[in-house]
Amino acid sequence: MKAEDSFIQTIEESIKRNWNLDALTDYKGTTLQYKDVARIIEKMHIVFRHAGVKEGDRIGLCGRNSANWTAAFLSTITYGAVAVPILHEFKADNVHNIVNHSDAKLLFVGDQVWENFNEAAMPNLQGIIELKDFNLVVSRSEQLTYAREHLNEEFGKLYPCRFRSNDVCYRREKPEELAIINYTSGTTGYSKGVMLPYRSIMSNIAHVHDKVGLKAGDRIVSMLPLGHIFGLVVDFLYGITIGAHLWFLTRMPSPKIIAESFSKIQPRMIACVPLVVEKIFKKNILPQVDNRLGKLLLKLPIISDKIKEQIKKQAMEVFGGNFIEIIVGGAPFNQEVEAFLRKINFPYTIAYGMTEAAPLICHSRWDELEYTSCGKTVANMETRVLSDDPKNIPGELICKGMNVMLGYYKNEEATRQAIDKDGWLHTGDMAIKDAEGNIFIKGRCKNMLLTASGQNIYPEEIEARLNNMPLINESLVLLSGDKLIALIYPDNDEAFSQNLDHAKLETAIEANRIEINRSLPAYAQITRVKLYPEEFEKTAKKSIKRFLYQDMKF
């Protein structure tokens, strides 16, 4: 598989080659084989033609991960329309705005999100199709209504004998042709439509295939929302191109759900946000070695290897015991958990990128990954750090190459701000790059805190340490005047198990502040901690929406 290959041709050949293999399964639900997916694609093409959909027209998709969501997406792409994946977690008014802004002609919706939408707020849609069974819930076209009501009849006219693999024949795209408009969740509250061409999608898929190398029939669990480019490309589109069997949990991936489902599915590759891995290790693995004997055994040179192997085996079994590696991306990884994973030789790796690169900028195999780095620059891309001393002094990371977007839809000004005149995409992340090419992300440029003494503070680094401490679920470090304040969402379950009332909990958190300050430089001392009553609001990739908390009074 090469980055220069035709993406649609790769999809077509995979469907034909894996005709009788399982393709898509809703956990505790139905399974579609590749031939079933091909049949749905053909039927949706009939619907599109009757609805007057032309090549280049936009089709929206908004719903939870499911077999039918992915079949609808493949129908859109192979027809020549532009797919507009929309996060089902978006509020209704944001979805209405995206549908209208993207000029979508049709919209596929999940039944759980459809009840919150108002079709009158999306007046330019020709129709709305429910993903559960592909029923037409809104039609503004007689031809579309006819096509849906007579779909099996129309399909029978085209294939009077039987629909075979030889009947599968899709168009061919041009590399620069627009494939997807993916609206960012972002941390500023404003969605921008990232225009991704076919070459950026195929380049990402070719890189993952080269680094991971799954085979037809291998199983992948799709946990990341398909409305976000990381899950869409790394899980779904890569999986389909090599004939993998994709499973959709159709529910939140809690530690309990993962333990139950992964033991059955036994996935070969897992992609997830750090929070999923961190929760499982903190709840299921670390408590078993977080005692004097466990810590002592891990340090003893003779016994430790045996103990480490036992812990690794148990950790592997939690995730199904059959995977090549876990790819973590979308947010910074907890350094304490990462250090523990390395100690037991657990096969994890970090993927760094952004929607505007569809999504990969950095990624290395797990056995090539440098500690705390996000790997090296991926194939078909270049990276630079804008710093006088990029090996030691952080600067903004910029990149260029095949993965980079065409620009933001209907937003030339934002495009000019993101991509400079020489074609470099500015990531907005501060990084350093060592002599071997490993890249270490230090934090967001806009999140960097500048003190009155001129010191640069990256709050994410302090937050990672805080989040490792007892009784802390998550934290947010803010600058109030010239003082660092830590907003803490406590681990209330742990506090309850220790019989800590609010006053005692505050005392314990204050002790954490004193403890962490011992390891921080003078300019980065936390002056005060304040408890926050609920989990911080996040984007779909679990980044905290910092802008919501920056103007808080302390």
Image (spheres, rainbow, N blue to C red):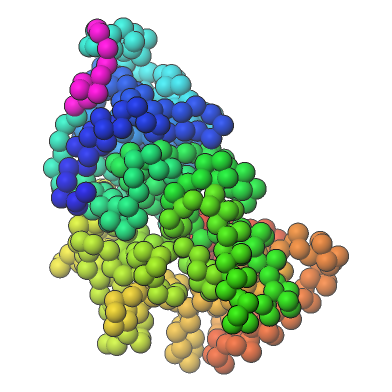
- Is 10 above or below relative to 391? above
Q: Is residue 192 visible?
A: no
Q: Main secondary structure of the magenta part?
A: loop
Q: Is residue 110 visible?
A: yes
Viewer-proximal residue among 69 and 183 = 69
- Determine the residue positioned at 49% across, 27% down: 30
- Is 253 above or below relative to 36? below
Q: How many marks?
A: 0
- Determine the residue positioned at 61% across, 76% down: 304
Residue 299 in picture, x, y percent from top left: 62, 81
Q: Is residue 274 shown left or right of residue 527?
A: left
- Is 77 above or below relative to 235? above
Magenta stretch: residue 165 in it? yes
Viewer-proximal residue among 123 and 43 = 43
Viewer-proximal residue among 79 and 411 = 79
Q: Is residue 325 shown left or right of residue 302?
A: left
Q: Residue furthest front?
A: 302
Q: Quadrant of the C terminus?
A: bottom right
Residue 356 in picture, x, y percent from top left: 30, 56
Instruction: Write the start and end of the magenta stretch as one range.
Output: 160-169
Viewer-proximal residue among 135 and 303 = 303
Residue 463 in picture, x, y percent from top left: 56, 73
- Is 159 above or below relative to 190? above
- Determine the residue positioned at 45% across, 74% down: 372
Q: Is residue 226 shown left or right of residue 55?
A: right
- Determine the residue positioned at 27% across, 36% down: 14
User: Hey, which quadrant is residue 169 in on the image?
Assistant: top left
User: Hey, which quadrant is residue 69 in on the image?
Assistant: top left
Magenta stretch: residue 261 in it? no
